[in-house]
Amino acid sequence: MVEESSSIRLRLQDRINNLPNSVLHHILSFLPTKTSVHTSLVCRRWRNLWKNLQTFNFCDNSHYMIYDEDNIKQFLCFTVFVNAVLSLRRSRDTRKFHLSCVHFPSDPFFAYSVDTWISTVVGPQLEEFHLTLHCLDGFAFNLPQSLLSCSNLISVSLSGNILFQLQDSSGICLPSLKVLQLLLDMYLLDLNPVNIFLSACHVLEDLEMSFTHESLAILRVPTSLKRLKIMVETKVGACLEIDAPDLKFLSLTNVTISHAATIGNLHKVEEAFLDVLPTPESESVEPLLNLLRALSGIKHLELFSSTTKWLSAAPTSDFPEFHYLLHLQLFLLSFNFNFIFDMLHKCPILQTLITFNDKMDPSFDSSPAYGWETKPQSVPKCLVSHLTFIKFEAYLGHSNELEFIGYVLQNGLVLKTVLIDDFYMMNQPEEWKEKIYDLPRGTMCQLKIH
């Protein structure tokens, strides 16, 4: 058995060694650079393979929350390794560069090292640039201007304490940039340089942003986008201006929608996740309605608690029609089934409905309220023709919930599954379980209680 396994290993090793260098270089490009360099110990043929790499992935393991002698020594070892790799490589061109490390701008050695590495790899062949910097002393790393003029750069990711210093877009030339991720850990982020940067990204298709902001400011995104994800880490929000006729995916968290904001050309969006806020000066629901009306082609929609609370203040007659919506998820601060019922009337071909009682939100109202204001005169079209799956998450066991479940069970003519989650978190679960199973059903749908 030992000889057989040894023979198999030798055959596999020979098979790998028989691969051409170009294939081996491609394999090494997917590994961390430290691992790629260690392959030089495999055999004589592998000794210098890594030197032909044009893809580098450096990750420092220093603890970014502690500035002490041990971390300084560890960063020094990391610096020696990065400098050695970049100086011994045979190709001066870099296609992909990933760097994650600590950064202490007040320490000249740290600042000089990071600046030097970026300056070394910036060039006309650079296609991917990912930079993550952890700063302890509250300062930020100033992004080198040279990075903003790489003509073949396709993907950029900037994470941590990184600062844009731009007065205008004259020095920006990114004609190939399609993917941009900005996860900026800056408490007092100035959106003006960010807007200047974005205004020069004429072919950008995928934008993801996360930042903290102290006061309302306008964020303008490129019209070329196909995917947009924005997360503001505070409830202050940021006013969004968006006109993206090719956008297909939209995710907004703690983003403020105001009358002044420009929202339009979102008819191609198929999937949206909305956690949006009104401005402090106005609770008018019209900006939210304008956003929802713009999403005329939406197929998958999730409305979070701040959004459903805001939308529930609107008259039912003002709700837009979602003619193509197939999946709807509602996060609720109270189980207002008049609101849910009104939403169903606006979704004629809805197939999946998920409601979630957001009990972790401080504004959650656990009191049993919001029963039928008046008995409905008509059944929502989707309930009798398309709605096959309903899920109630964080079920509370209130009478209004039971009444709504009874209504959909009796009138859901095509229902296949009704799922009730977190059922055993409530008092007297067996009693409620029996009540639900006794409810009359319009079809032989599967009722699951967890």
Image (tube, rainbow, N blue to C red):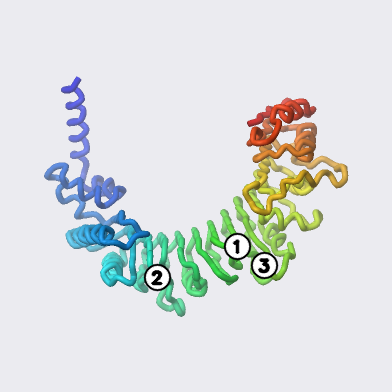
Amino acid type, label 3: Thr
Q: Quadrant of the N terminus?
A: top left
Residue at image x 68%, y 36%?
426
Q: Label 2 near label 3: C-beta < 8 Å?
A: no
Query: Closer to the camera: disc 1 or disc 3?
Result: 1
Numbered mark located on residue 208 in the image: none
Name the foreground residue: 118 vs 171: 118
Residue ID at (79%, 27%): 440
Q: Which mark is residue 279?
A: 3
Residue 346 at what x, y percent from top left? 75, 49
Please identify, in this view, whether the residue under mark 3 or under mark 2 is nearer the observer: 2
> Would you identify the image quadrant in which residue 293 lies?
bottom right
User: What residue sits right under mark 1 in the picture?
Assistant: 235
Quickly name the residue at label 2.
139
**Label whose residue precedes the other's in the sequence (3 or 2):** 2
Question: Element at badge 2?
Answer: loop
* Element type at mark 3: loop
Amino acid type for the residue under numbered disc 2: Phe
In 3D space, how far apart are the residues under numbered discs 3 and 2 (Cα atoms)?
A: 31 Å
Where residue 242 sits in the image (x, y, percent)? 60, 65
Whether 111 is drawn above or below 445: the answer is: below
Q: Residues within 10 Å of mark 2 (few under 14, many from 20)?
A: some
Spatial distance from mark 1 to mark 3, Cα to Cα?
11 Å
- Measured along the vertical axis of the image, is residue 54 above or below residue 145? above
In this rendering, the answer to whether 284 lies above or below 24 is below
Quadrant of res 112: bottom left
Asked if residue 221 can be seen in this view, the reply is: yes
The residue lying toward the viewer, choosing from 92 and 215, is 215
Instruction: Identify residue type, mark 1.
Output: Lys
Q: Relative to 220, is 443 above or below? A: above
Judged left or right of residue 65, residue 43 is left
